[in-house]
Image (cartoon, helix red, strand yellow):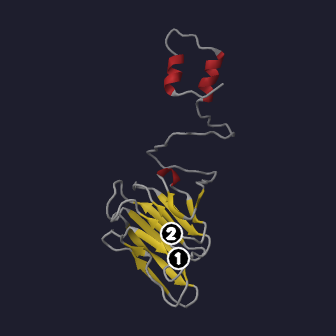
């Protein structure tokens, strides 16, 4: 018994054919069963014209970043929690934007090197903003990305612009083509120092 593609199944059930028991089993195994409680897997994309309700939970997973500039997230990582997992300098590059792509970046450990999120294309960056709160001073402020959407870097240094443990940034794609303001940002960053500063910059 094995799952088969639609073209394979069509070739088994042509007019005048006499399918075997094994072929009928393949047909059954290739279809979703609405009452089966065993896990069923789908490897293709899902497109729905109506609402989608998930009652069993949705675990998109976690991706841990490593030190260095080689980290990337892809469209397949959409929905995942992306963890700045080391204190050392870590850069992560976003993919080409698509409407609805969503990444949640969280900081596990106080940054001692720059923790950076970079748009794939220079000048094709962020809208929105983040709150930066100092853990060593009674100070907090809200910082917006440049309204022209050209800021293409978010940098947390472990100092005045964030990078403390628990810092969180959500980045959502709001355009299907790369351009200024194609990503929307929201978040809360933990800073260290007597002042706070913006994490946004243009390359």
How far across and down, in percent of the image, does residue 172 sit? 44, 61
Query: Looking at the rendering, in which quadrant would you find the C terminus?
Result: bottom left
Q: How many numbered discs sit on the rendered protein?
A: 2
- Describe residue 148's horizontal placement relative to residue 190 as left or right: left
Distance from the alpha carbon under mark 1 to that under mark 2:
8 Å
136, above or below 166, in the image: below
How far across and down, in percent of the image, does residue 6 sit? 50, 27
Q: Nearer the viewer, residue 7 or 55?
A: 7
Q: Nearer the viewer, residue 168 or 111?
A: 111
Query: Looking at the rendering, in which quadrant would you find the N terminus?
Result: top right
Q: Nearer the viewer, residue 131 or 179?
A: 179
Task: Say whether marks 1 and 2 touch (CB < 8 Å).
Answer: yes
Q: Secondary structure at mark 2?
A: strand
**Outermost residue toward the right?**
38
Q: Residue at x 45, y 76 (%)?
A: 199
Residue 110, label in figure: none
Q: Which residue is mark 1?
A: 189
Q: Residue at x 40, y 71 (%)?
A: 128
166, above or below 59, in the image: below
Q: Residue at x 54, y 88 (%)?
A: 193
In which quadrant of the rendered view does residue 84 lie?
bottom right
How far across and down, in percent of the image, does residue 35 sit? 65, 37
How far across and down, in percent of the image, does residue 100 sit? 44, 56
Residue 169, label in figure: 2
Q: Residue at x 33, y 65 (%)?
A: 123
Q: Secondary structure at mark 1?
A: strand
- Judge the density around disc 2: few (<14), some (14-19), many (≥20) Cα neighbours within 10 Å: many
């Amino acid at each position: 018994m094995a799952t088969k593609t639609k073209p394979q199944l069509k070739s088994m059930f042509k007019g005048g054919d006499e399918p075997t028991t094994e072929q009928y089993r393949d047909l059954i195994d290739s279809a979703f069963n609405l009452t089966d409680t065993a896990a069923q897997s789908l490897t293709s994309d899902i497109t729905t014209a109506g609402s989608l309700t998930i009652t069993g939970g949705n675990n998109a997973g976690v991706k841990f970043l490593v030190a260095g500039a080689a980290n990337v997230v892809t469209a397949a990582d959409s929905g995942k929690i992306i963890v700045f997992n080391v204190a050392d300098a870590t850069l992560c590059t976003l993919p080409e934007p698509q409407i609805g792509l969503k990444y949640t970046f969280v900081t596990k450990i106080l940054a001692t090197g720059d923790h950076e999120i970079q748009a794939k294309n220079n000048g094709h960056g962020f809208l929105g903003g983040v709150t930066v709160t100092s853990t060593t001073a009674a100070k907090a402020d809200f910082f917006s990305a440049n309204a022209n959407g050209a800021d293409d870097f978010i940098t947390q240094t472990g100092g005045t612009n964030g990078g403390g443990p628990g810092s969180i940034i959500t980045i959502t794609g709001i355009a299907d083509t790369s351009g200024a303001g194609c990503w929307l940002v929201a978040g809360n960053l933990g800073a260290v120092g007597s002042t706070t500063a913006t994490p946004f910059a243009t390359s």
